[in-house]
Amino acid sequence: MNFITKLLKKEKKLTIDFCEKNLDRFLTEDLQNEYNTFLSKKNIEYKEYHCQSRCEECKISPYAIVNGEFITAKDSSELLKMLKNLQKDK
């Protein structure tokens, strides 16, 4: 890849919003390092909000809002896999 192509090719960021309460409820201690590693990648931006006013969904399963799209999973491990797949597609 030449210099101009690299310069013009911008890596798109994945913007992820989490609810702190949802993370506290579903994120297991053994997955925290995996989440931290994933979220520290350069094309990932994330925020944790105290509450996102999605209480019904929050009680049922882990979720994230990715680039404005609500995604949910059966557990935190599956959610991380989904986030990784979305990141690969960018």
Image: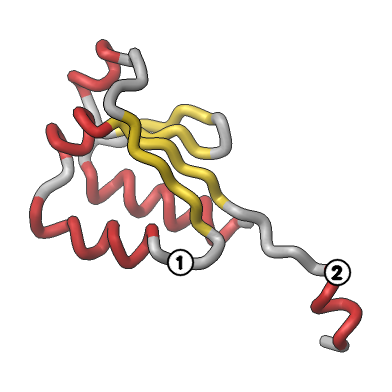
The foreground one among 54 and 84 is: 54
Image vertical order of residue 37 relative to residue 60, above or below: below
Task: Name the residue tied to disc 1.
Answer: 41
Residue drawn 28% across and 57% down?
35
Residue drawn 21% across and 40% down?
75
Residue 56 falls in image quadrant: top left
Could you give the CA–CA distance between mark 1 and mark 2, rounded to whole angstroms? 21 Å
Instruction: State the image coordinates of residue 82 (x, y, percent, origin top left).
Output: 41, 48
With 90 as the anchor, is 21 left or right in this view?
Answer: left
Instruction: State the image coordinates of residue 81 (x, y, percent, origin top left).
Output: 36, 53
Disc 1 is placed on an element classified as loop
- Number of disc labels: 2
Q: How is the image coloured?
A: secondary structure
Residue drawn 53% across and 30% down?
69
Image vertical order of residue 63 relative to residue 41, above or below: above
Instruction: State the image coordinates of residue 31 (x, y, percent, origin top left).
Output: 17, 57
Q: Earlier in the sequence, mark 1 or mark 2?
A: 2
Residue type at numbered disc 1: Lys
Residue type at numbered disc 2: Leu
Task: Name the residue tied to disc 2.
Answer: 8
Mark 2 closeness class: few <14, some 14–19, many ≥20 residues within 10 Å: few
- Farthest residue in the right direction? 4
